[in-house]
Amino acid sequence: MSKHSIVHSTFTVERTYPATAARVFNAFTDPVKKRRWFGESEGFVIETFTVDVREGGHEVSTFRFQGGPLMRNDTVYQDIVENQRLVFVYSMVVGDKRISSSLASVELFPEGKSTRLVYTEQGQFFDGIEEPKQRQLGCDELMGRLADELAHHS
Amino acid sequence: MSKHSIVHSTFTVERTYPATAARVFNAFTDPVKKRRWFGESEGFVIETFTVDVREGGHEVSTFRFQGGPLMRNDTVYQDIVENQRLVFVYSMVVGDKRISSSLASVELFPEGKSTRLVYTEQGQFFDGIEEPKQRQLGCDELMGRLADELAHHS
């Protein structure tokens, strides 16, 4: 019997953006914006990038990092409340190996003219391939890239 | 703006069954068996019950409890390792209101002639409708019903 394991891990990333909740929400639903901050990054070549924010909507992105194996993010939205929350499940696949499945939520809380975003990921990391800590760092970096998106694009 | 909230909660239910991992796994994949222990229960009337254990497979069950509103369990399998684990996401919907989305795993560990089952649910409970503790009790009861299934059916 081959060796299989699951590490269950929950982590949270919080940021406050000087933008309305509607603007932050829009950065998740607008395909051009979402691809810019969520997909495009130095060293990554994107092969597929779809956006479909509706309950039951399925998004797929496939990409390679520095000529490495094809990586795939399969996302399916579970629950959406406009300008308030997005709940989705996503799996990460490297080559033909699923390395994780996660349930994630993005919650938006207006605070004066700003918006506090709370990202919570409840992840299952399979067979010791990726550390939850590494995923958390990646998500923190993404939330920083979202700050840049909001600062530099209308 | 209406009041929305998410409670994130992770819980685990463990049982050891006097059965092989293959038998326990089969109780999840055989439609007759799964319906018997997972679906049929006093006071519940089942309207739909499908079983489709494969990665990407979608299961739906709809039922009423004592003439109450229609309830629906939407399950999609994320990762399957035969006789070892099942990973799935499921939402519970009451009437037309989604009350939770959860990522869950069933892990099977052979221990001599028995099998230890570890059920882990990473749940998001929406808008204060169901308490995670209530869900945990329900899952514990289900694992007891699985014990009865394994004891009384081949």
Image: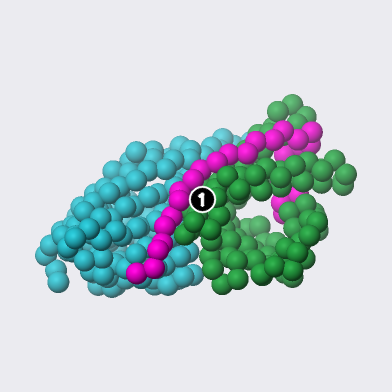
Chain colours: A green, B cyan
Depth check: A128 or B31 in front?
A128
Q: Is residue B57 above or below residue A84?
A: below
Q: Position of residue B14 (x, y in %)?
A: 27, 49
Q: Residue at x 77, y 52 (%)?
A: A37
Region of the chain picked out in magenta, as a range: A1-29
Residue lying farthest top? A112
Q: Position of residue A139 (x, y in %)?
A: 65, 46
Residue denoted by label 1 = A123
Q: Position of residue A70 (x, y in %)?
A: 66, 70
Quarter where residue A120 is shown: top right
Q: Residue at x 48, y 38 (%)?
A: B7
Depth check: B97 or B35 in front?
B35
The answer to whether residue A54 is seen in the rendering is: yes
Q: Is residue A75 above or below residue B12?
A: below
Quarter where residue B145 is shown: bottom left
Q: Amino acid at mark 1?
A: Gly
> On the rendered structure, is B140 left or right of A151?
left
- Say few, some or many: other residues with alpha carbon within 10 Å of mark 1 (under 14 / 14 to 19 / 20 or more): many
**Residue A26 painted magenta:** yes
